[in-house]
Image (cartoon, rainbow, N blue to C red):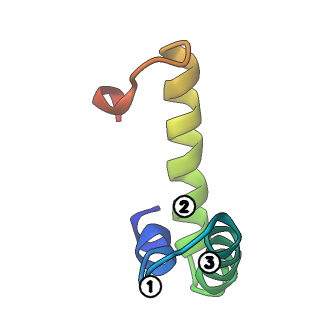
């Protein structure tokens, strides 16, 4: 997840459309890196489950 954020925010983003485009481009790039997509998927699942456990509250302390 941190790699994807680094790719997305590598350049200054001026508006929401640019942000969405950077996210899409970052996902395409990241999915082409062996095992990177699987690590991102696992990280997202961990975050989603912790969010559910905390009933939508703060969950970073659970990571």
Q: Which mark is residue 40?
A: 2
Q: Earlier in the sequence, mark 3 or mark 2?
A: 3
Rounded to the nearest angstrom, the CA distance separating label 1 from label 3 is 9 Å
Q: Using the image, determine if residue 5 lies above or below residue 60.
A: below
Which residue occupies the foreground of this view, 27 or 19? 19
Circle 1 residues within 10 Å: few <14, some 14–19, many ≥20: few
Q: Earlier in the sequence, mark 1 or mark 2?
A: 1
Q: Residue at x 61, y 56 (%)?
A: 41
Number of labels in the image equals 3
Q: Using the image, determine if residue 15 lies above or below residue 43.
A: below
Give the residue number, with chain letter if any, for mark 1: 11
Q: Name the spot of residue 34 as percent of width and height, x first.
A: 58, 83
Locate residue 25 relative to residue 35 in the image: left or right.
right
Q: Name the spot of residue 21 as percent of width and height, x first.
A: 70, 77
Q: Using the image, determine if residue 41 lies above or below residue 4.
A: above
Q: Secondary structure at mark 3?
A: helix
Q: Name the spot of residue 37 as percent of width and height, x first.
A: 61, 70
Q: Nearest to the eye among marks 1 and 2: give it.
A: 1
Which residue occupies the foreground of this view, 43 or 25? 25
Q: Earlier in the sequence, mark 1 or mark 3?
A: 1
Give the residue number, with chain letter if any, for mark 3: 22
Q: Quadrant of residue 59?
A: top left
Rounded to the nearest angstrom, the CA distance separating label 1 from label 2 is 21 Å
């Amino acid at each position: 997840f941190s790699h994807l954020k680094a790719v997305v925010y590598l350049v200054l983003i001026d508006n929401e459309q640019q942000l969405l485009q950077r996210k899409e481009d970052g996902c395409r790039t990241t999915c082409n890196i062996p095992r990177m997509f699987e690590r991102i998927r696992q990280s997202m699942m961990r975050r989603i489950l912790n969010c559910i456990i905390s009933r939508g509250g703060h969950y970073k302390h659970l990571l």
